[in-house]
Image (cartoon, helix red, strand yellow):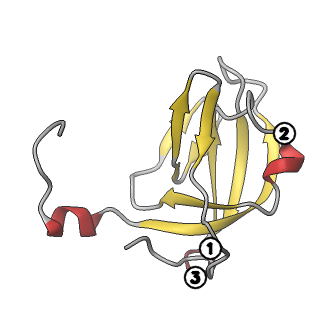
Amino acid sequence: MNGEPLTWSEFERVHMVAGTITRVERFAEARKPAYKIWVDFGPYGELRTSAQVATLYTPAELIGRQIVGVINFPEKQIGPLRSQFLLTGFPTAAGVVITTTERPVPNGSRLA
């Protein structure tokens, strides 16, 4: 195991929820290939972020895909974009593989 073990209350503070990608645009100003991504998180609204997932996914492949995002980090300025959540994924040699749901769940469903 790496690092210090988390307490249950620390884990509960991380708000990981399911959302559906509604819009994707190429992020021309990014240093590495990236997209601007908008996600519908149901009761939490539509939030946007930037993600370096352009090596494995086209915009058409991402639209409608349900993902897992962390929505309670502070907003972060990424070039001209204000990122509102963290799109989760697994780094691989080929690129980042996005974390998705195995079956559809309501947008805004919290990971438990």
Residue 76 lies, with reference to residue 56, above or below; the image says below
Q: Label 2: few (<14), some or many (≥20) within 10 Å?
A: some
Task: Name the residue tied to disc 3.
Answer: 43
- Secondary element at tag 2: loop
Residue 38 lies, with reference to residue 51, above or below; the image says below
Q: Nearer the viewer, mark 3 or mark 2?
A: 2
Q: Quadrant of the N terminus?
A: top left
**Three-letter code, disc 3:** Pro
Q: Residue furthest right?
A: 60
Which of 34 and 56 lies nearest the eye of the viewer? Answer: 56
Q: Quick one: label 2 or label 1, which is nearer the N terminus? A: 1
Instruction: Name the mark on residue 104.
Output: none
Q: In the picture, residue 92 is in which quadrant?
A: top right
Q: Quick one: label 3 or label 2, which is nearer the N terminus? A: 3
- Secondary element at tag 3: helix
**Three-letter code, disc 1:** Gly
Q: In the picture, residue 14 is in which quadrant?
A: bottom left
Task: Name the residue tied to disc 1.
Answer: 45
At x 63% / y 67%, what residue is drawn? 19
Q: CA distance from mark 2 to mark 1?
A: 24 Å
Query: In the visual, does 8 lie left or right of 87?
Result: left
Q: CA distance from mark 3 to mark 1?
A: 6 Å
Q: In the rendering, at what x and y percent does residue 29 appear? A: 72, 24
Q: Nearer the viewer, mark 2 or mark 1?
A: 2
- Secondary element at tag 1: loop
At x 66% / y 19%, what residue is drawn? 32
**Three-letter code, disc 2:** Thr
Task: Name the residue tied to disc 2.
Answer: 58
The number of callouts visible is 3
- Contact (Cβ within 8 Å) of mark 3 with mark 1: yes
Q: In the rendering, at what x and y percent does residue 109 appear? A: 52, 78
Q: Residue furthest top?
A: 31
